[in-house]
Amino acid sequence: MPRRPPQHGDHPRRADVVELRVHGVSGAPPSAVLHEARVRQVAGDGSGGFHRRAGADDTDPDGLTLEAYRWADLPSGTVARTLSMVFLLPFMLSNLAVWMRPAGRRAAGVTTLCRLLALNLTVVYVVSIAGVALDLLAWRCLGAARCRAPFDTLAGLDDWPVGQRLAVLTLLPIAAIVLLRLLGTRRPRPAGNPLWAVEPLVARLRAIHVAAAFAVLDLLLLTARRAGGATPATTLLWTLSVAVLLFCVGLLVAPGLIDRAATAGVSTWLARAVGVVAVGLSVATLVAVASDGREWPSAAGLPGYGAIAGGALLGQMALLVLLCGLVLWRPGRAEARSALPRGAAQLTLPRGAARSATPRGAARSATPRGAARSGTPPGAARSALPRGLGATVIAAIAVGLTGAFSAGLVYQAGDLLGGFGGVGGPPLPYRWTILAVFLHVVAGVLACAAITLLSRRRRCRAAADITARDFPAVPPEAIGRLRLATKAVARARFTEWLGVLATVYAALAVIGLATSLLGGTGRGPEDLTWRFLGLPAGFAGMALAGGTYIVAAVVLVLLSGGVFAYRTAWFRRHVGILWDLGTFWPRAAHPFAPPSYADRAVPELADRITQLAERHAGVVLCGHSHGSALLALAVLRLPPHTRRRVALLTYGSPLDRLYARLFPAYLNRETLREVGERIGWRWLNLWRDTDPVGGWIFAAHRPGDPPPDPADPASGVDRRLRDPRSLLPAPGERRPPPVRGHHPDESEPEFRAALRELAGRLRCPDGG
């Protein structure tokens, strides 16, 4: 193959090979990745950078130049930012659900439903904040009920007319909308770093969500005002607010309007225009409500608030059930085409790379088109998460958290203010939501326990077969270690049952839909549980109390997790996957989700790999866990002259075991094969049976499996590591080798052998 002619600015190439390590979601510091106490940064900034050993010798035991890329602070970085992710968790999950959609003709419908669901989450958020400000404070505490001091007077607002009180306290939900927009805004671009891409879709989605939030806020005020008699002004404003809300829905439903590059200018103008109109209507609504001197109706709560809150909660449950039905519709049928989110904020590829379904001029994805069939090789069948089902599970969690947070906010605020003690009680929709949270959690825990127990025998039997083949002759003193290894394999194989658990959890969405429909009857949980189930009213009261405790516990756990995930490496290793995976994908559904870090990390990696390949004989990319996904996407961005000097070593990789099933339209078998083809199949993947996250990519190669097909280059990628390496201590050692599981161990003999093999391929003149 002819070499690329020297270019201006090229550096003389050294004869050594670079080993570039990329860590996983554990966020290990560079010193741990490089196994050196003193390190120095050679590129990047404080959030993400490339590091080498501080001494003059930066080579590893095999003579390779050692370098590490640390990206751990890109998705978090500070306690404040990590906590903001906690508050934006439902939005982050709703955005993640879009990227989990199935391939084929259902993709467009799933995308639309996910975006409508994301918009509904914003509406529920605004309605709950308005419930505290308008219903509890302005209407109850300063009017019908007597709340605790100082909320019963609140700076003298109790003497103001009702309309003026409502108009002033509307500033609280308006401030919440502004806060949402600020939390979801991208961090400032690092100085001197041109790699930070711009997400073209987020601005349009942000304008649509802001417009819908203001429209719903206007509807709350105008519905309450019209309860005492409509006027031409309030009728006109109410009609226009409904029109704005419907227009926002139409922008999301219209096929390809906000996605296609050809309509990007028009959709951007429409989104901005509806945002301006919504803000103008809000100003007019506040003026109309504050200046209206007529009497307001007498009611325990803000008139119309319960109906609007119930409609918003019912809407999200109906959308979730529709999403589940669409994803589960004919799930076994293989579909031949994959629809990428056109124009969405995607990871870009250079021209000439893998073709996507994105039209000319739009942002391209780092994933090629044609991504439906991701079959498992014969003899290595898995029963993991069915492809596309992850969208419904993640969307269900997002909806559940939103409902729990909104109901918990109204409940806790009411208890704090004392607004539920004198007149009325919590709005009826939130009482049913709290009951749904309790039932959902109880059913989910029971389902998880049942699947764990039912699968235990099969997992233990399969694990025993594996360890029996690995250790056919076990001395008596090693029986305990054999049992420990068998248990580790059995625990790791629970991942194969996630599909069953996900299906059960998605089916639990009917609980929320049923409770939302029952809430529309106007009867409380106590009445209907007695009438239909024959249970005493006290049962519903206990369930409601349990639901409030569950919500409070979830908030406390998330807040604690947000702090400790940043400050404690051990804690981050267990919860970091939620943040790192959730913020990996660009925002294509909810604009207030935390911004993606992949649009910096992937181009930054590709740029560094290109630089190293120009200066050295080659680069061996070593990616552990989620780091293997970053490297796979970076390989898809590399120019041809760089790919010829690149090899890939992945270990503990979830690319096929989890990601190909969670993201079937993007990280699928065809995409992974293209990664191998682009680097001439200089790719080795190390995996262990004790690893609950990582696994093989193309073939398991367990003892007793059929021999690999020599004509298929993918059959030589995967190499299984026996874990533990032995049951007895090595000569001179006091303890036997540990069970490594998902933990990286770059000092393992198998890892060093694979590294030397790939480095040798790069040093060969033919690149083989």
Image (cartoon, grey):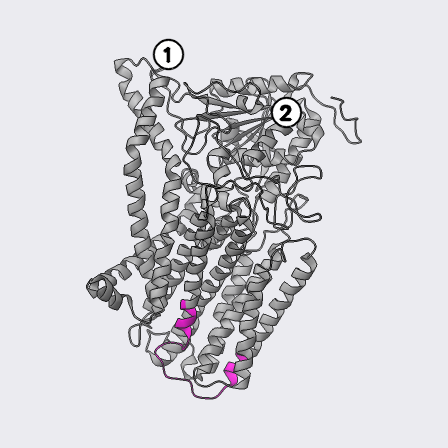
- Badge 1 local density, few (<14 within 10 Å), some, or many (20+)? few
- Residue under label 2, please give it: 680
Q: Which of the two discs, 2 and 1, sits closer to the camera? A: 2
Disc 2, SS:
loop
* Residue placed most toward the observer, 618 or 230: 230
- Asked if residue 409 is positioned above or below residue 235 in the image, the reply reads above
**What residue is rendered at 41% in x and 70% in y?**
131
Judge whether residue 411 can be spotted in this image: no
**Residue 298 among those drawn in magenta:** yes
Q: Position of residue 421 (x, y in %)?
A: 28, 73
Q: Work out how far the residue at label 2 is from the one at label 1, CA to CA, in angstroms.
A: 42 Å
**What residue is rendered at 50% in x and 57% in y?**
118
- Tell me the quarter of the picture where residue 298 sits: bottom left
Q: Position of residue 52 (x, y in %)?
A: 59, 29
- Badge 2 local density, few (<14 within 10 Å), some, or many (20+)? some
- Residue 732 marker: 1
Q: Which residues are magenta?
A: 286-310
Q: Farthest residue in the top direction?
A: 731
Q: Position of residue 337 (x, y in %)?
A: 58, 42
**Residue 449 among those drawn in magenta:** no
Disc 1, SS:
loop
| Horizontal side of residue 478 vs 655, given as left or right | left
Judge whether residue 672 can be spotted in this image: yes
**Contact, mark 2 vs mark 1 (Cβ under 8 Å):** no
